[in-house]
Image (cartoon, rainbow, N blue to C red):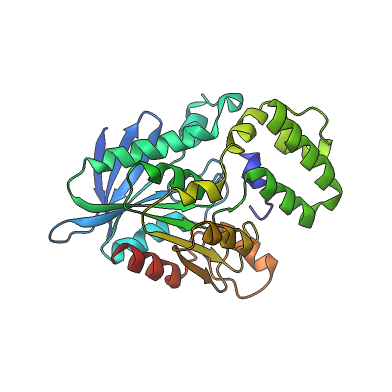
Amino acid sequence: MKNTFLILLFFFGIIATAQNQKYISEDLSITPLIDGTLQTPEVNGKLPLAIIIGGSGPTDRNGNQQMVVNNSLKFLAEGLYDNEIATFRYDKRIVKQMKQRTINEKNIRFGDFIDDAVAVLEYFKKDKRFSKIYIIGHSQGSLVGMVAAQGGADGFVSIAGAGQEIDDVIVDQLAKQAPGLVDNARTSFDDLRANGVAYNYSPGLASIFRKDIQPFIYSWMQYDPKVEIAKLNIPILIINGDKDTQVQVSEAELLKNAKPDAEYLIIPKMNHIFKEIEGNDLENSKSYNIYNLPVMPELINTVSDFIKK
């Protein structure tokens, strides 16, 4: 996941109650494609609920992908639970589709993820146990969440969310990693935006522009995070880590500029998956596959304080 091309490489109810040593959990099926885990602390009266939306790729409810296990979203949820905040986190629909072998990447659209988030929000708006509902969106989930939150959330938290449209984000990434591909990428994105298809892309950009993926990229390009976050008239918290090698601090600054009244925090030493990084990029990369490395307490405390205001 160190390679930022992972943004694009993986584009692609019944209630069962369980309790572990500390966290009371319910596994919920919100729709035929959306399965997740609700964790509700035992408190007197109503409590706030945070819906956690994962980032790009086939990301499961815990923040993991096949052969990449860091439990970032699981640890975030448990930290909020310890602060008497309920959470619901869910597998992206493509996780279930891959398990069922029903996924067809040429039919995937960015709006599918928004529809799923809206369905989750609508489900919990009917649940009288919760006083307020907040949406927490991580990475790609930030844009998904800020659009879904327009449907009646009480607050929104962006963690490592981009501030530019996805084509501009990728071009900026290429400028750092493969500058020789920048001009071709920019031309191909412009063709895709204008015509809905791009043909003359470099083989080095096939992971982004191959035919079956283009409809998804095109659909993603229709959303500008700066425009979407400005539509929200609810409390907003924007967070990024200064050790994030996938989403730069400058992206968070763009969101803050678009919504000046939002709360804003850059967490020192925090990387893209909320882990503390003291050293170099090798340490950063290794953290993506350390299953028991905790997330930073400052993140949990900041989000908790924001939600409980």
- Residue visible at 31% across and 52% down in the picture: 154
Report whether residue 216 is seen. Answer: yes
Q: Is residue 186 above or below residue 290?
A: above
- Residue visible at 46% across and 39% down in the picture: 92
Q: Is residue 108 above or below residue 229?
A: above
Percent x, y for residue 236?
41, 59
> Is residue 291 shown left or right of residue 136?
right
Percent x, y for residue 79?
36, 64
Report whether residue 140 is seen. Answer: no
Give residue 78's quadrant in the image. bottom left
Which one is nearer the viewer's eye here, 38 or 108? 108
Give residue 249's quadrant in the image. bottom right
Which one is nearer the viewer's eye here, 77 or 53? 53
Marker count (numbered): 0
Percent x, y for residue 87?
32, 53
Q: Is residue 217 above or below residue 306?
A: above
- Residue visible at 73% across and 53% down in the picture: 172
Q: Is residue 115 above or below residue 40?
A: above
Quick one: quadrant of the C terminus?
Answer: bottom left
Percent x, y for residue 219?
59, 33
> Is residue 178 shown left or right of residue 19?
right
Which one is nearer the viewer's eye here, 50 or 65? 50
Toward the left, the furthest residue is 44
> Is residue 259 shown left or right of residue 39?
right
